[in-house]
Amino acid sequence: MAVVITSIKVRSPLGCTLEECMKNIELGKRCISTIENFNTAGFQTTAAGEIRCNGKVVITEPNIDRKNFFLDQITTELRNSTSFDKKYNPSEIAMNIGSGLDYVDIENLYKNREFTYPKTAHLPSHYKSNKQITEIAAKNNIKGGCNVFVAACAASTQAIGLSYKMVNRGIKEAVITGGADSMVNQINYLGFYNLGAMATAKEGEAPYICKPFDKNRSGTILGEGAIVILLENSKKVKQEKIIAQIAGYASTMDAYAVTDPDPSAKSLARAISNALKSASITPEMIDCVHLHGTGTYKNAPAEYKALAQIFKERVKELPVYSLKGQIGHMIGSCGAMEMLGVIYSIQNQVVLPTINFSEQDPHAPLYVIKEKPLSIPINYILKLNSSFGGENTALIIKKYE
């Protein structure tokens, strides 16, 4: 028995179908541009990776919470295309989704002073997102439980990890997992700018400003996207439906600082080690690594140190990759969205070039592929994501045989 990915539905800067996304990954299309969904006057950073369909940014009204708006669409698409609610008893299916901060319509709040909380003495900080995602699950006849993860950049990877465990241990027959987040709004941009994590782009520079691992990187660029992934027991599906296998998972917490990664990277290294044990493989069996790769100053050295602790001298020749230079940082949905790059690598047996990377950082001498894909045999990929607060996640994805 294996835990396998059998279907994916998506809304992202790369496109609104899996086929469109894979084509734009192959082309290396830069999907970061000047924001179209809100007025950026007064903002020093005006770029983002916004959801696109057929190359055009999808525009919604200011009162729309884009993350759950698109999550609703793709969950229904997944149900219609797979009939998971007919294949399984609804109580045998769960939904685990990574999400982000509750959305505030700041324009309406400013103009009309309309902003109300529900009347309750015990108000959770993510009450709206939790309520909306639970409603999406119920609408699609998912009755085996609904869990919403809000661990920032690690949220959707944690959602996938729990889903893997549920199916692997026979707790659920199938799980709909993934993530949905939209950082394309005034509050999120103000917050990340004040944290000093954002790159700034002049007119025309936006597609090139996020530079994961590069010596001249200056920060990340935010993005948005929603993706749902159907995980099933391999014994319950036809082999031709299988896209890839989830083989292992682990999560750790270093609690070093609210924003900065632990410079020793010991906790991240432990997540990698535990994920390898979960998959019952050795470090030598990993063929490439899809890193978190935010484009910030402190991320790359931390990821390098973690890899060096596990892979030793082999870190110099272990190919690594990040998708964020192409689509931006989606926070609550980034790990799940970056599975698109992982799947592309497995299906095409290549390590993709990291968009906008050109010059190696001596403090993070990673083997970053640039300009054109590297063709190598790929059976196992390590996928890492880390978040504010020190949460670290590691997934092992395998070519299914």
Image (cartoon, grey):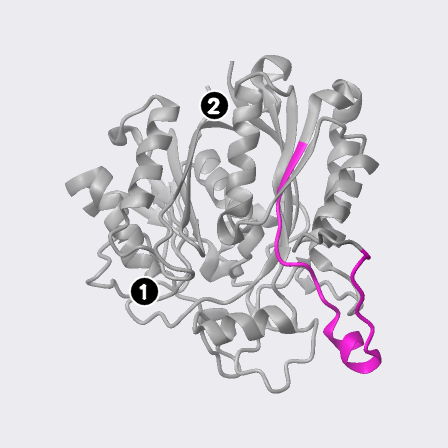
Q: Which mark is residue 83?
A: none
**x and y percent of residue 27 in the render?**
50, 54
**x and y percent of residue 373 in the render?**
38, 48
Q: Residue at x 27, y 26 (%)?
A: 282
Q: Is residue 189 positioned above or below 352 on the image?
A: below
Instruction: Please tell me how crowded label 2 is: few (under 14), some (14-19), or many (20+) other residues with Cα within 10 Å.
Output: some
Q: Which residue is mark 1?
A: 214
Q: Is residue 256 positioned above or below 110 on the image?
A: above
Amino acid type for the residue under numbered disc 2: Tyr
Question: Magenta span covers which residues?
Answer: 95-119
Instruction: Please tell me how crowded label 1 is: few (under 14), some (14-19), or many (20+) other residues with Cα within 10 Å.
Output: many
Identity of the residue furthest to the left in this view: 313
Query: Magenta span has 110?
Result: yes
**x and y percent of residue 268 in the render?**
33, 45
Q: Is residue 171 positioned above or below 21 on the image?
A: above
Q: CA distance from mark 1 to mark 2?
A: 33 Å
Q: Residue at x 43, y 74 (%)?
A: 196
Q: Is residue 12 among the parts visible in the rendering? A: no
Identify the element where label 2 is drawn.
Answer: loop
Q: Are marks 1 and 2 in contact (CB under 8 Å)?
A: no
Q: Which residue is mark 2?
A: 400
Q: Is residue 281 among the parts visible in the rendering? A: yes
Identity of the residue furthest to the bottom in this view: 42
Identity of the residue furthest to the front in this view: 121
Which is nearer the eye, 323 or 249? 249
Q: Residue at x 66, y 46 (%)?
A: 10
Q: Is residue 132 left or right of residue 171?
A: right
Q: Quadrant of residue 182?
A: bottom right
